[in-house]
Image (cartoon, rainbow, N blue to C red):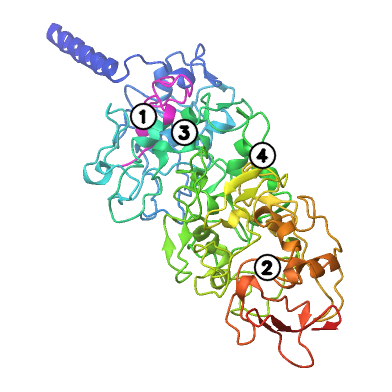
Amino acid sequence: MKLKLILLGAVLAIGTAVSAQQITGDSLGAHDLSPTGTSSIKGDLSAACQYCHAPHSGLSQGTPLWNQTLSTQTYTMYGSSTYTGNPTPQPPLGSASSLCLSCHDGTVAPGQTVAYGKFNMAGTMKSSDTFGMDLRGSHPFNLALPLQDAPDLVDTMVNGGKTGDATGAVQLIKGNVQCTSCHDPHTQSRDKASPNFLVKDSSRGQLCLACHDPNRASLNLANPLAGWTTSAHATAPNAVGASPNVGPYADVATNACGSCHGMHNAPGSRVLRGADEQDCVSCHSGGNNVSPQLLNVYAEFGKVGHPFPSPKDPHDAAEAAVLNNNRHATCADCHNSHATQQTSSLTLPPQVRASQTRVTGVSETDGVTALNPAANEYQNCLRCHGTSAGKTVNPIFGYLPARVVSSGDLLNVMSQFTLSSSSSHPVMHSRSSPFPQPSLRSNMVQFDGVTPGRLMGTQIFCADCHNSDDNRESGGTGPNGPHGSKWTHILERRYEISSAASPGGPISNLFPTPDLSSAGPYALCGKCHDLAAIMSNTSFLQHSQHINAGFSCSVCHTAHGMGGISATISGERLVNFDGNVVGGKAGQPISYNRAASSCTLTCHGKAH
């Protein structure tokens, strides 16, 4: 009998030592359901461990002597259009995640024990701790085995069964991701700022980076997290206010992944804190959510802006580069949130700006080939404004001229800007006009029409014309880029476009003897061209007569370039008449020949 007692004492001592080793520094926190615990739920039993564990008579098979009644619910598991693994199976009863869900799916009340029956409990769980049966808003777990490799996973995840966490705190459970890979149910506050039973401090995305590697370059696939290490979202020191739902830490860089992703009950796809652009609004809509305050990009879309997606036309990360269904323009269409960088200096055309680092584009050679990443700004614009079959004329953007010479698709700018075009603004290629441009300034001018801006150079951006009407690059205080403008066609400055009821008929919006300042009807043209030089007829003898009569530049000139080839219109200097305004003369086709200084047309009721 004495020997038995000695052996029993030894076993208990070993058990106590093992237990202490596993939960050193244990602080059950919200998992202490005893009368003296700190949980919002309290029961009659004073032994805190026994709400979950039973020394005897618990669910011993495959479980750590589990005592809480398991949930038998069927769950809708995580999935997305970019998820490469096999469909996620249901977590088996008694598995690590099943134990957690026995309380956290909200269908089995705490205190429903196997060994002792039901305890009287007071209080309720926080709604944020109850996940329900729809787990699509939670980080994927209990994945189908074997794990499928992906370019953003740590290379040992699949091949070695280990995470990249050097401390060993973040672990795969039997080769799989389970709740306990990230959560230790015995210790609530290893991360003092995020007391959510995390296995380690997760500031600056440490928990996420244990499995996700933004620097991995393998599998011959693009890493969607590439560029993260030096990105604005990984390095921005801006303090975060208490109101935005952007993570538990004090600033953007420390919140890191958590600025945009919520690991449980996230409303957006891919565990985003918001759907599409709503995920960006928390910080990029002005106000005091972030300090120093960020520019209010969201407000720009309330002007004449790129259209947000509708419920029937959502953005999806798996979209093809060519947006054939392009009635939306989310932040993610033009910005890569994992790689975007703060614009501290402005690149020269045609390169993408820092804020568009590693954004997707389309090749200008065929309009179809995806470029990931795009090298030039216009390649990103071609996702919608090239060969896309979904382009439509939207009246909100204003009147659209119908150019006499075109390739057939008036909305496809590729043929208009191509090097083979007889004349075009130098967006997709450098200036190569054989004719001197006497009106061209050496520097673009700022909004005031006087202060020199960027050197003219040999090439320009799409955004030099299509930009916010208050953008900083041109001397304003607002965000750069074509988010929205008070002027039609998202133009950064005023540009009046003449129209007529029928070709050759009277023009309804003439601007006789126009104001040539930055407030005038042709302020956009005046950004790069000296309107006084144009009025002095240095390039065309009839310029001043036409302009003083009130005709817009758009009557005779296309803004982009010659979209096709014509036997009757030579096309130099962007001369390509608006077919809605200009008609033929006496049944003859409209013609223009600069070398011969001749044209044949009817305009404003007068035959030329």
Please give the residue where the numbered disc 3 appears in the rendered image.
256
Q: Which residues are magenta?
A: 176-204
Please give the residue where the numbered disc 2 appears in the rendered image.
539
Look at the numbered disc 2 and give the secondary structure of its residue: loop
Q: Position of residue 352 (x, y in %)?
A: 49, 51
Q: Residues within 10 Å of mark 3 (few under 14, many from 20)?
A: many
Upstream in sequence: badge 1 or badge 4: 1
Where the C terminus falls, by quadrant?
A: bottom right
Residue appearing at x 61%, y 31% in the figure:
244
Magenta span main SS:
loop
Q: Position of residue 441 (x, y in %)?
A: 63, 54
Foreground: disc 1 or disc 2: 2
Q: Position of residue 476 (x, y in %)?
A: 68, 41
Please give the residue where the numbered disc 4 appears in the rendered image.
296
Upstream in sequence: badge 3 or badge 1: 1
Contact? badges 3 and 1 (CB < 8 Å): no
Cα distance in 3D space between marks 2 and 4: 42 Å
Which amino acid type is shown beneath numbered disc 3?
Ala
The answer to if 201 sits in the magenta stretch is yes
Q: How many marks?
A: 4
Residue 181 vs residue 240: left or right?
A: left
Residue appearing at x 28%, y 54% in the figure:
219
Foreground: disc 1 or disc 4: 4
**Dividing the picture into quarters, in which one does residue 504 lie?**
bottom right
Which amino acid type is shown beneath numbered disc 4?
Asn
Upstream in sequence: badge 2 or badge 4: 4
Cα distance in 3D space between marks 3 and 1: 36 Å
**Which mark is on residue 66?**
1
Upstream in sequence: badge 2 or badge 3: 3
The answer to if 569 sits in the magenta stretch is no
**Which mark is on residue 227?**
none
Which amino acid type is shown beneath numbered disc 1?
Trp
